[in-house]
Image (tube, helix red, strand yellow):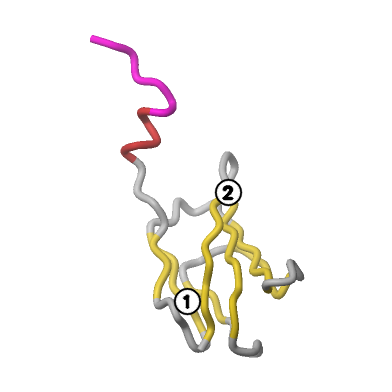
């Protein structure tokens, strides 16, 4: 028997699922734990919108192009590349 380390524990956690990508006006985030916040940046690094992550993020008033979604919780942050049609 070996003790479980924090690295091994992370292998069993589900990763966030982001869809659709490319998107039109909104994206959906699955496998949230409940304490996440999000920030969406454009390709220049400017903050487009942010808030509490509840599963649906509306990004309707932006131009087509590349955006970055960062999801933050108490211990980690994960960034995803998004493409808006």
Q: Residue at x 40, y 36 (%)?
A: 10
User: In the image, which disc is placed on residue 5?
Assistant: none
Q: Quick one: label 2, few (<14), some, or many (20+) residues within 10 Å?
A: few
Q: Residue at x 53, y 67 (%)?
A: 81
Question: For the magenta stretch, what is the residue range?
Answer: 1-7
Q: Residue beneath label 1, please?
A: 27
The relative height of residue 82 versus residue 59 in the rendered view (above or below) is above
Position of 18 compared to 39: left or right?
left
Disc 2, SS: strand
Furthest-top residue in this view: 1
The relative height of residue 10 versus residue 54 in the rendered view (above or below) is above
Furthest-left residue in this view: 1
Check if residue 59 falls in the magenta segment. no
Q: Residue at x 59, y 88 (%)?
A: 64
Q: Relative to the observer, which residue lies in front, 34 or 40?
A: 40
Quadrant housing the N terminus: top left
Q: Where residue 36 appears, x then y in whole percent?
A: 56, 54
Among numbered discs 1 and 2, the one appearing first in the sequence: 1
The relative height of residue 31 versus residue 8 in the rendered view (above or below) is below
Q: Quick one: label 1, few (<14), some, or many (20+) residues within 10 Å?
A: some
Q: Where residue 24 appears, x then y in whole percent?
A: 49, 88
Q: Residue beneath label 2, please?
A: 77
Q: Where residue 32 appears, x then y in whole percent?
A: 44, 56
Asked if disc 1 and disc 2 are in contact, CB closer than 8 Å, the reply is no
Residue 5 sits in quarter: top left
């Amino acid at each position: 028997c070996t003790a479980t380390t924090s690295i091994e524990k992370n292998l069993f956690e589900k990763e966030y699922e982001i869809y659709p990508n490319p998107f039109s006006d909104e994206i959906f985030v699955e496998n949230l734990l409940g304490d996440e916040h999000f920030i969406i940046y454009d390709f220049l690094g400017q903050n487009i919108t942010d808030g509490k992550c509840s599963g649906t993020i509306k990004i309707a008033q932006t131009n087509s192009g590349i955006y970055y979604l960062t999801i933050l919780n108490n211990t980690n942050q994960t960034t995803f590349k998004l493409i808006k049609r």
